Image (tube, rainbow, N blue to C red):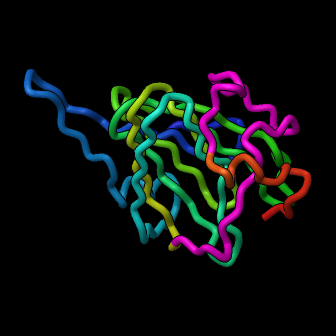
């Protein structure tokens, strides 16, 4: 596994090694010993999977508040996404800044999003399946979001606003300036 860091401390791009031949490939998509040697002790407790049928579906920017803040390890099983992590850690020098990567079933890359970050993605094609591991259980009482197109964050999404397919929750999420940092 290859681990690449960003200018913002916390998120890490993880690229598992693929061993391929004429039949396809084999890959260790997760190995606790290698992950923990790079990231630190991490305990995943739940795996989540989503299917987004239409290109331009945006899921996010989501997070869970303490005491159930989640770290996430995201990967794409089918298709491709523009994946984003936004720093909302209190006292962080990079508060409100983001990292963005393309994750796809072709590149096999994964994004580690630690607690204290918003997470969201935009599907780049139809019928995208995303799977992610989380470090705490889902808690409806701690579930929260920030508006996907917040100008204070300034994410350059790969679609026009009119094309965005959003849930009711994501359409009405608060702005970054209206939430409490983690």
Please give the name of the residue rendered at 63% of the width and 42% of the height, measured from the top-left corner.
166
Which residue is nearer to you in this view: 94 or 23?
A: 23
Quadrant for residue 101, please give it: top right
Vertical side of 150 occupied by 107: above or below: above
Answer left or right for 108 relative to 10.
left
Answer left or right for 70 relative to 157.
left
Q: Main secondary structure of the magenta part?
A: loop
Which residue is nearer to you in this view: 174 or 135?
A: 174
Residue 81: x and y in percent read 50, 32
Residue 176: x and y in percent read 84, 50
Residue closest to the far right: 177
Magenta run includes residue 97:
no
Vertical side of 124 occupied by 63: above or below: below
The residue segment tinted magenta is 138-166
Q: Quadrant of the N terminus?
A: top left
Answer left or right for 99 relative to 126.
right
Please give the name of the residue rendered at 54% of the width and 71% of the height, measured from the top-left corner.
138
Residue 83: x and y in percent read 57, 37
């Amino acid at each position: 596994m290859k681990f690449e860091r960003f200018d913002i401390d916390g998120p890490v791009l993880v690229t598992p090694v693929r061993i391929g031949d004429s039949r396809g490939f084999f890959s260790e998509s997760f190995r606790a010993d290698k992950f923990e040697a790079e990231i630190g002790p991490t305990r995943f407790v739940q795996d989540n999977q989503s299917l987004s049928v239409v290109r331009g579906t945006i899921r996010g920017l989501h997070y869970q508040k303490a005491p159930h803040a989640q770290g996430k390890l995201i990967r794409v099983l089918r298709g491709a996404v523009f994946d984003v992590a936004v720093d909302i850690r209190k006292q962080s020098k990079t508060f409100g800044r983001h990292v963005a990567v393309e994750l796809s079933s072709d590149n096999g890359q994964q994004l580690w999003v630690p607690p204290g970050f918003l997470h969201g993605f935009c599907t780049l094609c139809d019928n995208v399946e995303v799977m992610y591991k989380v470090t705490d259980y889902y808690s409806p009482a701690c579930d929260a979001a920030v508006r996907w197109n917040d100008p204070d964050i300034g994410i350059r999404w790969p679609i026009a606003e009119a094309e965005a397919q959003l849930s009711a929750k994501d359409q009405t999420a608060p702005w970054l300036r209206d939430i409490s940092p983690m």
